[in-house]
Amino acid sequence: MMVFLGVLVLISQLADAQCSICTKTASQLGEGPAKALNSAIIYLAGAPLAIMGYIGWRWWKREQDVIKSEEQTSTKG
């Protein structure tokens, strides 16, 4: 899991995460501020994505536990 997150962080630096309005604004700012704007957008997207990933992981883990407990009860009976 940590390896996946590390790769995701490294790859996200290459992404262009700008909507059309941000792209237009960034093109008017110049190259330096445009890169800073893009980095800020990616940075701000990280927290909601991390929260969604955590919720998904917890859901998956709970489902795995339910499946294991159902298998154990079916083999006992």
Image: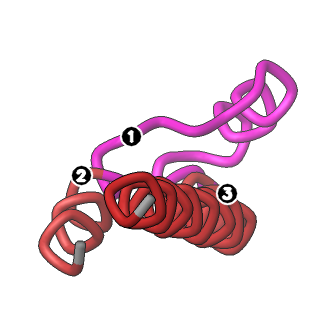
For the point 31% across and 67% down, the residue is 9
Residues under labels 2 and 3: Cα distance? 14 Å
Q: Quadrant of the C terminus?
A: bottom left
Residues under labels 1 and 2: Cα distance? 7 Å
Q: Position of residue 17 (x, y in %)?
A: 58, 39
- In reply to whether residue 10 is colored magenta, the answer given is no
- Left or right: residue 55 versus residue 34 is right
Kind of residue at badge 1: Ala
Residue interval drawn in magenta: 12-37
Using the image, tell me which numbered label, if any, was put on residue 11. 2
- Left or right: residue 31 versus residue 45 is left
Indicate the colouring scheme.
secondary structure
Q: Give whichever of 11, 4 is nearer the camera.
A: 4
For the point 51% across and 64% down, the residue is 57
In the current view of this chain or complex, which residue is farthest to the front? 77
For the point 65% across and 31% down, the residue is 27
Using the image, tell me which numbered label, if any, was put on residue 32. none
- Left or right: residue 40 versus residue 2 is right
* Residue 23 appears in view: yes
Q: Position of residue 69 (x, y in %)?
A: 48, 67
- Tag 3 residue: 41
- Tag 1 residue: 15
Q: Give whichever of 4, 8 is nearer the camera.
A: 4
Kind of residue at badge 2: Ile
Q: Quadrant of the N terminus?
A: bottom left
Residues under labels 1 and 3: Cα distance? 10 Å
In the current view of this chain or complex, which residue is farthest to the top? 20
User: Which element is circle 1 on?
Assistant: loop
For the point 59% across and 71% down, the residue is 58
